[in-house]
Structures are given as structure tokens and as C-alpha cells.
Amino acid sequence: MSSASHPYQDPSLSPAQRAEDLLSRLPLEDKAGLMFQPLAGIGDFDAPGPIGYPSTRTLLDRRINHFNTLQASSARDLAQWANAAQAEVRKQPFGIPVTISSDPRHAFGNNPGTGLAAGPFSQWPEPLGFGALDDPDLAERFGEIVRREYRAVGITLALHPQIDLATEPRWSRAGGTYGQSAETASRLGVAYVRGLQGEALGPSSVAAMGKHFPGGGPQLDGEDPHFDYGKEQVYPGGLWDMHLQPFKDVLTAGISQMMPYYGVPMGTAYEEVGFSFNREIVTDLLRKQLGFDGIVCSDWGIIGATPWGVEHLSFEERMVKALDAGIDQFGGEAIPDTLIGLVRSGAVSESRIDESARRLLREKFTLGLFDDPFVDAERAEVVVGAADARDTGIAAQCAAHTLLVNGETKAHLPLDRGISVYVEGMDPAALAGRAHVVAAPEDADVAILRVAAPFEQRGVPGDLESFFHAGSIEFPAQDVEHIAAIASSAPTVVGVYLDRGAILTPLLPHVDSLLAEFGASDEAFARVLFGEAEPLGRLPIELPSSTAAVETSRPDVPSDSEDPAFEYGFGLRYEDWEPKPQPTDAERSTTTLARRRGGRYRLDRTSIGLLLKDPDARSVLADDIPELLDHPLLNATLGMDVPSVVAMVGDGVDERRRERLIARLAAL
């Protein structure tokens, strides 16, 4: 980077002045490079990028300087990679610093298309859990901690909050929302943006990107527009304005960026094309009516993968239409040469490129990236996942639990300490010091089961579709029968992880107590069970009573199913609750933790994540398919069943090895 003094290098000037000066000096290649934000792998710049993307070196050579990151093994690794990227771009003529972005990475869901599990970062409930608490102060505090941890590793752009409304219980993206209430989404969205950005965007901020404008959620049949069978957004209840309201409120609060969704508005006054191709949505509504002059970034891959409503157009024509709509940046794309070609052919004016490049440069200056883009990798190890953040996160996990049923048997919550329990779906070690774990339900005072909201496993394991929890929200008959069999032997507590709606009706005759949670560790669940923490959540979405009720409800209308099993806002409380102390190390060491021998797992219904918590099962996996433990997508498959994950590993696992693995796991 040249040491010559130019106005854009003068920090005493405003970001707008500096951006204007630099823009006047940039060649077309640098302007075009600003307008793309692909995925980039952490580590070797010359290694192939994730899921088919070019190497980081190739992206840098294309003058791209916005990168969306995936998992990193440690905060130090991510910070060191960020510093290396910043150092590399300083070798270019204008030294435009890198903006590093991230999908949500502070909770439990792990879908490479939507968000990442926490890893080294502090861990909190999913946004749906924040909706259950509806506490703006907590949402702002969470945003502040995300900002602190992101900036420590060099991330300066959050691809969130997701302020869509979860009005269709089958929608696979519901867990990333604050629930079905527009008022709650507005309150929490505004508070979270304030936590990320501060009172005004500046050098200590993380820029926030609200999504998915003008509101995802009212999806036909609950399907998601990542896929062609889910591209239709419908409004039979006429509630377009309700879905738009949270976006109006975060715009008023000063959010820096917006992301339109893939969906196609059907039966409205707007053109029936994906929102990023829709000039009436991006320019007329967002820019002109709502007065937004920040960055509009498309959702990922609209040109090549999800060109809904414009499938008939050529690759280049799609790009032109998106630019005409008002898109500033193409998320998930890495093709500046195509844009350069459109300018040189006269299909797109360079002044149109300047319009977007100006906004993108202005934000980089505002965030202080031109003046100090580097981070302290050693400090990142201390800041990320610090004790205060982890403690606050686990307290939020506990509080978000929502008590739906509390029976009068021995399974009445909170449970008595020192009882004998049979457990499934959680690590028995989490109950040390609280209960004695027995190997069979008939030997237990209480059975404790953790289950997840049901979904249909779709797609080829490892492909994007396979990570989306979609389809029916009915528990399979075999699951209900299994719970009923256990409940016939002991009073039973069931905890259900809700990452979207679920039909709990078939469970109700069998369970004594029932909790909903929205992302909680085994430790947090145990604290709630034994009264060390109180469940304070209220349902952020209605839980329907049947599939028929879901099918006759309107996707854009909250609480629209007939005779729901549990209404929106429902949540019981512990009676006369006083917090019990957490177990001491001495108490933990004196409890018995027995594991079942033979039939410990139903392998077609058990997640690989649960097996990895079991030392016996992990040993079997390490012996029989060691390549699984090093697989780059392992962290993203923790919620998948064993056969699907083994299939993902691919041809390296022959039939003989698969049979041996299944037999050994079944023998546990």
C-alpha cells in the first residue's frame, strides 16, 4: 500500500469524503470486486475453498474483499487468518481492507446454509429462545457480547438478525426468528442491532444485516426458498404489512445493511420474481418509501443457484436485473469478471457500479478498517468464550425453557435431588451430583428423555438440502411408541428441542412433565430439571394439535391453527420456587452413572452428536471410521442420524465396515 498521502487515507475526514476520494481513483476491477461476498475457507490461502468455492488466493486476485466465514477450530486460528488476509490485501495498489462476515454462530443449530454452532464462542439459545423470553435488555446484552467476540477475531459484519415472523410452523428457518409476534421481533431486533452496532455505526461496531426483507415466513406449505419447491411466499390472510413492520423498526434504529430473501411474492401487487430481482421491492419500497441508503446484499447464490422467477434469463441477464432492482452486493457469488464484462459491453453503466461501490467503501471506512484492520490473536483467545459470556449464555439457555406440563407424580418439576433416573438423549454425566443414573427405566424413580422436533431427512447426506429440518412436524409412530413404553415403566419427563413447530399431542397421554427448549446444553437442561434455574419462557409460536390443523391454517397469519395443543404465549412456572445450589464436586463424584448395555441407542433415530458424547460410542466410531472424526462437515452433522452421517463420509466406508460399525454400536 502506497505511503503517499491522499484524502482517503486521512482519518480526520468523514467516511463519506474518504469513500468519494478513493472511488474516484479505483479502476473498474476494484469496484467490481467490492460487489461480491463469497464463502472463504479458514487457513491456507491456496487450498480449495469450502463447498466448491475458489481458493482465498483466487478470490483476492479477483479483487474480492468481503468474505463470509465458516467454522474455525479456535478463536486464535480465525484471528490469525483474518490478520493474514488483511496483510495480503495491503499488497494491492489501493489496499482495500477485508470485511469478514458471519452467519449466526452463538447457538446450537448447525446448518452451513444458515448458521453455525458456537464452537469456541459463548453459547446461547437460538433466537426463538430469545423470543420465548421477550427481554430487550438481554437481547442488547447478547448483541454486545457478539460484537465483542466478533471484533476480537476480525469479524465486522453480522449476517443477522433474522427478523422474519414464524407464522408457518413447518418452516425450517423458524428457529432463527424471534417467533410469530411482530411486536416481539421489533423489540428484540432493535435491541440486538443496538448491541451490535452501538448507538451509531463506528470503529468499534459490528455492522448488522437485517434479513430477510420484506419478511420471510409465510412460505407455501412451510417449505423454504433455498429450494425450488419452496420459492412461493403467500399472503392469504393479507398480512403483508405485519411481516414488514420489524424491518421498518430496525431501519429506524439505523441498521447498516439489508438482505432480501429468495422467495417470490405470489398474488400480491408486486412482480412475481425473487425479492433480490424485484425493483418494486428493493428500490421503490426499501429505498424510496422507507428511505434506506445502506447496503443491500442479496441472499447467497441468486444468480446461479436460486434465480426464482427469472430462471428463463441468462446468467448475465439475471445479474443486470438484480442490479436494476437495486442490489449492491451479490452474496455467495465470486464472479466480478461477469460484472466487468457487462460494464464493458454497455449493458451496465459504470455509474451504477459507483453507486454500490460508494456504499460498500463508506461502511469499511466507518468501521475503521482502513485505519486499523488487525486484531490481537492472543487476546482473541481470552475474549472469545470468556467466563462471563459463557455464564450469561447458559443462564439464558436455562431461562428460555418453557414448562408446558407439570404432573403430580415423582416427575413433578423441579425434581428431587438424589433420585434414581433413566436417561435418553443426553449425556448422563450432566446429572452427576443430582441423581443416580440407572441402566433401565424399570429401575428408575423417573425417566428423563430429551428429543428434538421431528423433521424429514431430505437430500443426499452432506448436500445443502440435508441440513434443513423440513417437512412433517408429526412425531413418527415408532418414536411415540418408544416414549410410551418407557413411560409405562417410570414417571417420565420429556424435554423437546424446538427449532420450529412440533405436534406434541401424541406425547401428552404418556408424559408426566413436558418442557420445550430452544437450544440448551445438557448442563442447562439439568439445572432446570433440578430447580437450580427456573424456566421463564413462554411459547414464541403456537404449537398446533394436528397436521390437518396446520394444513388448513394460513401461512402469513400467526396463531391460525384450529384447537392448538399449546397457544402462543403459554408457559407454566415453578410454584414457590427458590433456587437450589448446584452440586459440588464431592457430590458429583459420589453419584452412580450407569449406562445401558445392549440397545442403548436406536441408531436410525439417534444423532451422531449424542454418540460423540458417549465415550464407548466415540471409541467405536474412532476404531471403525476414523475419517469421520476429521471430516470437515462433522460439526454441521451433529443433529443427523448415524446412517445419514456414515453415508456422507462416502465411498471410503464400504459395506463391510458399515455393518461392523452398526453391529458394534447396536451392542452398546
Image (tube, rainbow, N blue to C red):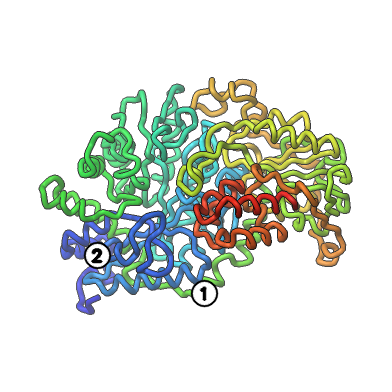
Q: Of all residues shown, which one is farthest toward the front?
A: 656
Q: As rendered, which of 655 and 75 lies closer to the eye?
A: 655
The kind of residue on which mark 2 rests is Arg
Look at mark 2 in the image and give the residue it sits on.
Answer: 18
- Position of residue 180 measured from the top left corner of the image (x, y, whole percent): 54, 35
Instruction: Tell me which residue sits at (49%, 31%) in the image.
Output: 222
Who's the residue at 62% across and 31% down the image? 474
- Label 1 sits on a secondary structure element that is helix
Q: Residue at x 75, y 56 (%)?
A: 430
Name above or below for residue 8 compared with residue 309.
Answer: below
Q: Residue 284 in the image: x percent, y percent? A: 27, 36
Secondary structure under badge 2? Answer: helix
Query: Which one is nearer the viewer's eye here, 332 or 586?
Result: 332
Location of residue 94 in the rendering, given as x and y in whole percent from the top left corner = 23, 70
Residue type, label 1: Arg
Left or right, residue 142 beside residue 576: left
* Residue at the image position 57 percent from the left and 38 percent from the top: 500
Can residue 139 be seen in the rendering of this structure? no
User: Along the polypeptide, which appears first: circle 2 or circle 1?
Assistant: 2
The answer to whether mark 2 and mark 1 are in CB contact below 8 A is: no
Image quadrant in which the N terminus is located: bottom left
User: What label sits on residue 379 in the rendered view?
Assistant: 1
Q: Is residue 230 above or below residue 237?
A: below
The answer to whether 583 appears left or right of 265 in the picture is right
Residue 615, numbered circle: none
Is disc 2 surrounded by few (<14), some (14 to 19) or many (20+) residues within 10 Å? Answer: many
Above or below, comparing residue 542 to residue 108 in the picture: above
